[in-house]
Amino acid sequence: MLLELNHIFKWVSQGGSRVFLLKDINLLVEEGEFISIMGPSGSGKSTLLNVIGMLDGFQEGEYNFLDQSVHSLKEKKRSQLYKEYIGFVFQAYHLIDELTVYENIETPLLYKNVKASERKALVADMLDRFNIVGKKDLFPSQLSGGQQQLVGIARALIAKPKLILADEPTGNLNSKQSEEIMELFKELNQEGVTIIQATHSELNAAYGSRTIHLLDGGRDNI
Amino acid sequence: MILNYFKIALRNLWKDRTFTFLNVIGLSTAFCAAFLLGMFAIFGLSFDQFHENIGSIYEVYTNSQTAKGTEISNANPIPFAEALKEEVPGVKKITRVANGGPLVTFGEKTLKLDVLWADRDFFDIFSFPVVGGSKINPLQNKSSIAITRTTAQKIFGEMNAVGQTVTMRRDNEDVPFVVSAVIEDIPEASSFQFDAILNFTDLPASFYAANKDRWDAHNHPVYLQLDAETSAAKFEKATAAFSNLHFADDIATAKRDGAKPNSDGEYRQIHLLPFEDISFTDFNSNSSKVNKTLPYLILGIAFLILFIASVNFINMGIAKGSQRLREIGMRKTLGASKGQLFLQFWGESIFVFSLSVFFGGLLALLLLDKFQTLFETKASFALIASPGIVLGLLLSLLLITLIAGGYPALLMSKLDTLLALKGKLQHTGKNKVRDVLMAVQFCIAILLISGTLVLWSQLDFMRTKDLGFNKEQVITLPLNTKKDRAQLLQLLRNALEGKPGIISVTAADNILGLGKDGRSSTIVMGFDYKGREVKTNLLNVDYDYPKTLDIELIQGRAFNKQYASDSLSIVINEAMAKEFGEKDPLSVRFLLNDSIQYSVIGVVKDYNFQGLNKTIEPISYFMNPSSPKYYAFIKVAPNNLSQSYDRVKEVWNTLEPDTEFLGSFLDENIDRTLKEERKMTTMISAGSILAIILSCIGLFAISLLVVNQKRKEIGIRKVVGASTSTITVLLSKQFLKLVVFAFLIATPLSWYLTTQWLQNYAYHINLSVWIFLAAGGIAFVIALATISVRTIQAALQNPVDSLKTE
């Protein structure tokens, strides 16, 4: 078991009444799974991913990640945990504009205090693998959307996470670029990385081994 | 990691070139100004601190009760110092000091030297290191002279000075003096400035010998060093008996005239003024108050300017932060801790600050010469560079960086990860901080501007006020000579009279204002008139004095060569007439020295013979042909003033080829007395200009950012029909409100402070509301112009462009 959500509730108070963002979510994810979360806009896909990614909290329920109860962990511990095991991929890529491709990929390693020589080797491997060696000194604004997302994924992978959380990774891409990215995810999954993606597209969802439908914060069906 | 931070810092700064530029320019200017002003202030405050015994050295002064109130004087009789040391316990060392500017001759060379006369203890009390000759005590022997290194070089060149003999003009004869020692040049930050020092007993007879045993001739200051176990207060208390014994006559006179004793029941009280404070005290204005306003004011302005620039930095930092939210959020997602983020942003601040400190320092070094000339100061970095000061400077730089750079960094590092990622920033509290800071900035600017306006008006008032004499057409000339002064004056008169452009020539023993020789003196005399003491300023004049100076005669006549008895006549001013209290002042007869009867022959209109910080005091002119006249006054025709000046100079140079011509017009002399005021005005003007410029840089930057943030709002408003002008008003309003708010806060404060300052002057301008309205108006208009640049541009923009970006 990689992670387990038990009866997760998340809400905001609006005018005295609760508006539920997540309502009684139960989810068990085994290592090596490729899960697609589907649902209309506002159904809570992103919120769920953020909760799994420990960027966001919740009011009720239990969350266990690799046998650690996340809900009772201190902020610092939690950040250590996700730094170690989770990589994020965003719809808008969220590359740091002022850093080159190389430096963007390198950044997570800096925060993990990896030695310079080791960093160099790891980043070089990654550039090689994604065929972007020639672009390593370019800035994000000089790349196409697909290439930027490639860099985003490379950055997510550099710290060798067990889990990749992808929030509409192809939302800003054209269909050809989308296909390439999804193929890449499939490849990664086959190598053993667990992936959870939120998506609108049935096509993309089909890459996953399992699909979860969300409707207004609750599981629709399994 | 560091390298990464550094790289991203550089790229960020480059990306926001405008802001980086504005920040660095603003901060560099502020640091430059702060360095220069701080240096000036610290130099002022460091005066006399170099004496090793500082803390136990004091100047003696006396508060004496008179019928008119308390009089404060630091002048003492000749036997005073020795008696004080013997009779009052606690004095470790004591010295009398007198100064003057005699002519000193060596071979062919004649120089006018600034000379001190002092007792032996002088070199034990004060730290003026001896570099050559008699190391023990240069003042050991009579007829010896100690000179500074530079003076030695000037007189003797490469020759060994010690043992040489120079002659000095004294009591109309050349007296030889042997150089006993060479001392280190006097530090710039010293109240004593002299080229040579002599034994006190070597003073001219009229000063020393004639008064040797007199307790009623006060003519020099006394300095002493107390024992370690004696406190100044204890010592002052212990002097009561001493004063009552030696000044019994003065006390009896005071009692008779109806003087009230002080709170201790004494009529004369000796006080000690710590020596480190003497450069901030002016006994001439009858006060022992230590006035450190100027250095602290300057230091204050330096801090205010730094504050304004730092506020700019903080405001821009916070505002820029909102454009880096994604980066902050992303870094947090990638595992950056708060501390790491804080360090990153703080590091960027430190980088900008270091750059600014560097440029500011460089600029200050480049401007140092100009600064020194403009403010007539010797202050320089080398002079104040003691380890303590350098450490303090570094610490304050670090502190400013920590606060100004750290605050935005702290705000940014504390942001919520998800909100930052989404680019959302809570707009609540932060704008309040920004608004308050900007209002304070404009408060300072308005305060300084109104201060500048008040100072300007007062200075202008003092320069142009009708002082009651003709200051435009009269040349004053110090009669420095080795010859007989009366004879020189006669030669001068003969040579000038009848020449075109010369109207009349006279002389007196005191100058008006401050001449090129930089000397001024006050002689006050008291005598008994009808059973009470009358005090008057004393002026020995030559014929034609009122006529030459256009001082109006309102009663009687001036001195006239046809009346032989005029040497026993006096001419007085209105204030003196009031002092006599007679209906007809011309009927006044009085005795001086118990025997000689003087009579008043004329009354002149009151005129400001002293500074405008004093009300007009009584003055009496005496016409004693044998008393020395130190200054000639020459009235010239109103046209071709400079030609007449050259003519006088020419005559002087033929009569006295060896002595420098130091003539100057009286209005120049008056200007010279306003040096402090002018210095202060220039500094505050410069400070206020800088303050308003820096405030506007900040305002400009913030208006840029706010307009950028509101692009969408502006676009929507235009689409629904807002006009260019309503949008400009909308955008400008929030800033102008701050300026108005600042004006309301600053004006009462400024009113209070300037009123306090004007109290120093007996003659001063009346504060009018207009001055403050003008200050507020200036700030308002400049602020409006600054923000209009961007707001109008934004309002004119096609809404399609601004909406497209969203």
Image (cartoon, coloured by chain):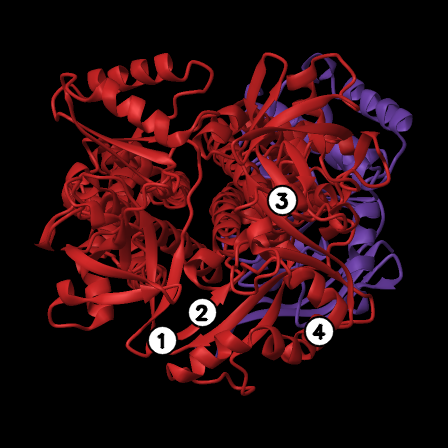
Separation of marks 2 and 3 at Cα, in angstroms: 70 Å
Q: Which label is found at residue B235?
A: 4
| Nearer to the camera, B611 or A102 | B611
Disc 4 on helix, strand or loop?
A: helix
Please tell me which residue is depicted at 38% across the width and 43% down the height of the picture: B627
Separation of marks 1 and 2 at Cα, in angstroms: 8 Å
Q: Amino acid at mark 1?
A: Lys
Shown colour of chain A: purple
Q: Residues within 10 Å of mark 2 (few under 14, many from 20)?
A: some
Please tell me which residue is depicted at 14% across the width and 41% down the height of the picture: B562
Chain on which label 2 sits: B
Report whether B803 appears left or right of B53.
left
Residue B766 x %, y %: 20, 60
Which image quarter: residue B38?
top right
Residue B217 x %, y %: 51, 59
Q: Amino acid at mark 4?
A: Phe
Give the vertical position of B509 relative to B231 (above or below).
Answer: above
Task: Provide the residue designation for mark 1.
Answer: B68
Q: Residues within 10 Å of mark 3 (few under 14, many from 20)?
A: many
Could you tell me if the residues under marks 1 and 2 are in contact, i.e. CB atoms within 8 Å? yes
Task: Provide the residue designation for mark 3.
Answer: B328
Which image quarter: residue B456?
top left
| Nearer to the camera, B766 or B465 | B465
Q: Residues within 10 Å of mark 4 (few under 14, many from 20)?
A: some
Disc 3 on helix, strand or loop?
A: helix
Chain on which label 4 sits: B
Report whether B768 appears left or right of B130.
left
Chain on which label 3 sits: B
